[in-house]
Amino acid sequence: MSNDNLRKLLKEYKTAAEQFQATSYWSAYEKDILDIASNINFENFRSGKHPKLATFGFSDGVYNKRFTLWKKLLLKLFNIKQRHTTPYSLQAADIHDMAYHYSSIVGENCNAKPISDISASSYGKPTGLFQVNDHQYTIPFLNYYVRYCFAHKHMSFKGNEVLVELGSGSGFNVEVLKKIYPEMTILCFDLPAQVYLCENYISGALGKETVVTTEKTLNWTDLSLVEKGKVHFLPNWMMPLLKDFKFDIFWNAASFGEMEPSIVENYLSYIRGNAKWIYLLQMKSGQKTTGKAHVKKKISLNDYTDMLNDYALIETQDAYTSISKLGGDYFEGVWKL
């Protein structure tokens, strides 16, 4: 996907209806992310050189903060010489082992496809890549696998489903699902820079032959050209095309919480009655209303329940990653039509 196509996306975005423009939360990051997307080297973009990409999922490093040379030397010294200086004498390798073991158990308990069947992509040179037997993983990859397990427990994926994801972010969720179910058909909707980055990542991680690009979808007037078994990328203002499109699963992780309730209601108006299942991972009480990145009005679990009153709420639970409870008081829930 070339920068020319990013420019086309941005041109169309400027004329999109107000309800599809970046919310107050994302406006704080929009310019920085666009600058990065316009100049990024996809061969090493998961190496930690672009920390702002972590705002929507591209976070593969062992440490969240960037360290000075002296701190890096100290960390290296502690990891090699003074194991007792870390909590419970843990090293990164110990955490990797526990995360993999936990993910395996969750998969078994949910009757999901085993984590041992799939590997994470090394495309973009992720700094947190590690090996288990003859497979490779990152902590984020395992995190998305754990989410899949919760959804599978109720939805019992067969592998030929049509799944729509709004706010695909990094694309790690798509990567996990497509590696487990190669025949699954996926439609990814997001803001211009995000969908551009996600499309490039999935093209590199899964192969260009698996992708239907925004260059092809941008001028669609309906979804009759959706290709079975492929990953389709569309800008978020094309969500109205879903109004008369029946599909199996709608998926949104975190991004609804970064919108105002009226914006979420608009997106869900294209989903309700068309999706058989809905998976949400969101903050129970919503995002903050002050600070650099904030929402004007919070959205809560009760709001989602009210907006989805035609659906049965099957289960909610506190959201966990493969190594800890997800910070920020998140829940994940499954609804059924």
Image (cartoon, grey):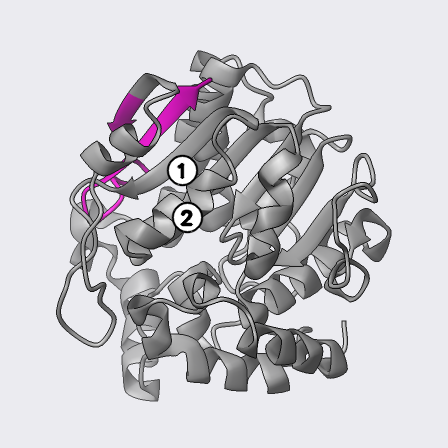
Which circle marks residue 99 in the picture? Answer: 1
**Location of residue 20 with respect to 250 vertically, above or below:** below
Q: Is residue 171 magenta?
A: no
Kindly state the secondary structure of the residue where label 2 is placed.
helix
Which circle marks residue 266 in the picture? Answer: 2
Kindly state the secondary structure of the residue where label 1 is placed.
helix
Is 166 left or right of 221, judged from the image as shown?
A: left
The foreground one among 145 and 125 is 145
Task: Identify the residue at image location x=76%, y=33%.
Answer: 182
The foreground one among 65 and 76 is 65
The foreground one among 151 and 245 is 245
Mark 2 to mark 1: distance in Å? 37 Å
Which circle marks residue 2 in the picture? Answer: none
Q: Residues within 10 Å of mark 1 (few under 14, many from 20)?
A: many
Kindly indicate the quadrant of the structure image that contains residue 177.
top right
Task: Identify the residue at image location x=76%, y=78%.
Answer: 2
Which image quadrant: the N terminus? bottom right
Name the front one of labels 2 and 1: 2
- Stretch of the chain drawn in magenta: 316-337
Q: Is residue 319 magenta?
A: yes
Under mark 1, the amino acid is: Ala
Task: Identify the residue at image location x=81%, y=35%.
Answer: 228
Under mark 2, the amino acid is: Asn
**Location of residue 78 with respect to 202 vertically, above or below:** below
Q: Position of residue 229 (x, y in %)?
A: 79, 35
Kindly indicate the quadrant of the structure image that contains residue 196.
bottom right
Q: Position of residue 153 (x, y in %)?
A: 46, 16
Say whether residue 50 is visible: yes
